[in-house]
Image (cartoon, grey):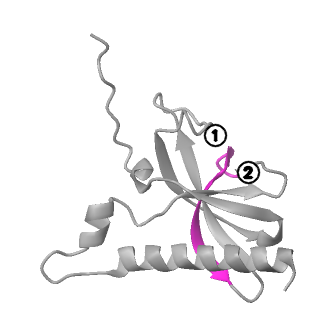
Amino acid sequence: MNNENKRNHFLCEALYDIKALQDVIKDYHSKYFGQLLVKIVGSDTIPFFLITQNGTHLRLMDTVKQFETEFFRIEAIDKELCRGTVSLLRAYDYEGHDTNLIAEVVRLERTSTVKSIELSGISAIQLLKPDMLKGKFIIEPKW
């Protein structure tokens, strides 16, 4: 197996694992505590961004809602073709404006927009904290 095929194999496996974990969080139901894992984690989404082979973050456009994002949720993975289906996560800063600067992102919002991506141009995955989907943040007073 050459290096590119090995990398694609590991990326597909990693995304498959993320999808499986999201499914466990979402589908686990206790007769006493309901959807306890969703309550503990705060979301059924594990957000991430993808790093391309040239070192930049993959950015995709939602042409209907007119925003661009580099934050995603895995929806499906085809291990045979090494393709992923992701939903776009819309990123907001503390003033509620769209942003793609990771240092400014305080909240991610799930959207219904899904895109299929070819993983051959991707070199890495970076997971983000699921709390970013909660939208709760505290601004401490300076004095």
Helix or strand or loop: what does disc 1 sit on?
Answer: loop
Q: Quadrant of the N terminus?
A: bottom right
Mark 2 falls on what kind of element? Answer: loop
Disc 2: which residue: 59
Please provide percent x and percent y for residue 129.
Answer: 45, 53
For disc 1, the marked residue is: 100
1 displayed left or right of 98: right
In the rendered view, tell whether residue 46 sits above or below residue 94. below
Q: What residue type is labelled 2?
A: Arg
Residue span colored magenta: 63-78
Residue 71 is a magenta residue: yes
Q: Is residue 72 magenta?
A: yes
- Where is residue 56 shown, x and y percent of the image? 77, 48
Residue 86 vs residue 26: left or right?
right
Corner quadrant of residue 73: bottom right
- Residue at the outermost right position: 2
Image height of 25 relative to 70, above or below: below
The crowding category of the residue bearing disc 1, from other C-alpha atoms within 10 Å (few below 14, some 14 to 19, many at least 20), is some
Looking at the rendered image, the quarter that the C terminus falls into is top left
Q: x%, y% of residue 111?
A: 55, 57
Q: Are marks 1 and 2 in contact (CB under 8 Å)?
A: yes
Tell which of 45 and 50 is nearer to you: 50
- Mark linked to residue 139: none
Quarter of the image holding residue 115?
bottom right
Residue 100 visible in the displayed image: yes
Residue 62 shows up from this direction: no
Question: Residue at coordinates 46% horizontally, 64% vertically from top-left?
Answer: 45
